[in-house]
Amino acid sequence: MTLAPWLKLARLGLLTAWLYSWLLVEGCGPGPGYGTRHRQRKLSPMSYKQYVPSVSENNLGASGRAEGRITRSSERFNELVCNYNTDIDFKDEEHTKADRFMTKRCKDCLNKLAIAVMNQWPGVRLRVTEAWDEDGHHPPGSLHYEGRAVDITTSDRDTKKYGLLAQLAVEAGFDWVYYESKYHVHCSVKADHSVAVEKGGCFSGSGLVTMADGVQKPMSCLRPGEKVLSLSESGEVVLSRVLLFLHLDRESRTMFFIFTTENGKRMALTPNHLIFAAPNLKLHHHEYEAMFAKNVRTGHYILSTGDNRGLQPSKVVSISLEEMMGVYAPLTEHGNLFVDGVLVSNYASVEDHRLAHWAFWPLRVLFRFFQTVMEENSQRVVVNSSAMVLNICSTDQTFLTNVMHNSSSSICKKFPDVTVETENEHSFLQQKEVYWYARLLHTLGQIFLDPQKFY
């Protein structure tokens, strides 16, 4: 390869760095809702004694199992952080600051909720009546003993606000919210080290995507360079190239939400992944907003494929939880794809599909640049950039990178164009777990963007 393409790449890198800074502020883009101003979703108050998600607190799909009581003399006490947010009132009736101690995840969710409360009710603050418990006032196994749970009210103690306060807590990212008492709302989170917290949003390895020839292929057998069904900006079902995997972990066992629709669709995705949904039946795809999977309710409508690859709304009739093997998150050119016949975003952890899609624009440009370079060079080209190498043969202009699921070898053999990866082989294009560029964007986004947007 000549030096000229690398000089172009350097200039392009500077351009994309500048562009990304601008996109953090001005982001908008394709997908359902394209060309319209993002609308604030109307919140519905939770009912008394309702809990979200609708499983027990210690279920893996909620806050997870208790890990043991933490005392001031415990080694794990050093994992707790003290919350000095001046926008939150801490009851601290023990005068020991115990109500200020909590896990980092709990603190982050609480701080997001404090902002939401002030925005919802100007002049009103969030009030914490109980957080970490060192005095044994709760039942055995309570997450209060680990700093993973808080009981909250509003500073004006207006009980009429508590139903909406509970829903705001769900939106703030608490993993389990219970409108437990007429006098407070109980919230809890997963452990900081929990795999479910650290992982990005994904699909299971058994999720089916539709290929160019109409054949349905398991996600575990999908590879970069192949084309899958996606939705264009104009609402047409089109083919979109898979560029890479934003998250790939073959061995991970993760809890998935299972959505079943009235027309028989059944698909699985993680709670923090974005899916296009609407609380009521909408006829135009632009009216469907991207939201976290955990916020979809029975009775909501999602978009699915109909006759002749058309697009049709489908009512969600049931939602369940299931632990499954493997997590996969492909990135397509259009920023979305159909999994098990349901339209879903490529993105997770930030509740703004349009912003996320534009933030990945530089990566898509780089891939197009590499394709142009490969077309200009007849010899074998190897491009190595930050642990990302594209190995291309002159007789095959498609990506030959293999991202197979080892346990799915027998399944993938049914697809003649797929070569299953052995343990001694590795994917140059693909990093295990969360892709470095996605991690970078997530870190920058948490610095510059509204924390309310994050899971």
Image (cartoon, helix red, strand yellow):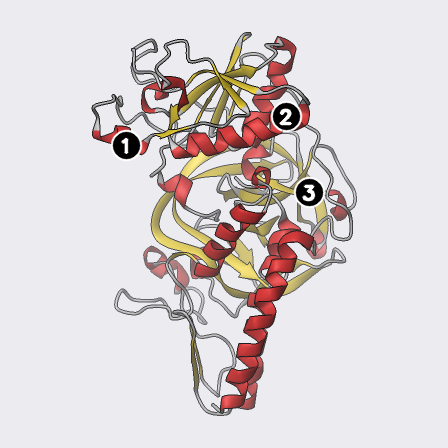
Q: Nearer the viewer, residue 83 or 296?
A: 83
Is 78 left or right of 215, judged from the image as shown?
left
Frontmost of labels 2 and 3 is: 2
- Residue 105 versus residue 169 in the image, above or below: below
Query: The residue tagged with tag 2: helix, strand or loop?
Result: helix
Is 312 left or right of 353, judged from the image as shown?
right
Q: Nearer the viewer, residue 256 or 451?
A: 451
Task: Kindly identify which numbered label has been placed on residue 118.
Answer: 2
Task: Kindly identify which numbered label has been placed on residue 111.
Answer: none
- Which of pointers 2 and 3 lies earlier in the amino acid sequence? 2
Residue 212 visible in the displayed image: no
> Rounded to the nearest whole Å, what is the CA distance between mark 2 and mark 3?
25 Å
> Rounded to the nearest whole Å, what is the CA distance between mark 3 and mark 1?
41 Å
- Which of pointers 1 and 2 lies earlier in the amino acid sequence? 1
Badge 2 crowding class, 10 Å Cα cut-off, few under 14, some 14 to 19, many 20 or more, is: some
Query: The residue tagged with tag 3: helix, strand or loop?
Result: strand
User: Mark 1 highlights which residue?
Assistant: 78
| Residue 223, image x, y percentages | 46, 65
Task: Kindly identify which numbered label has been placed on residue 289.
Answer: 3
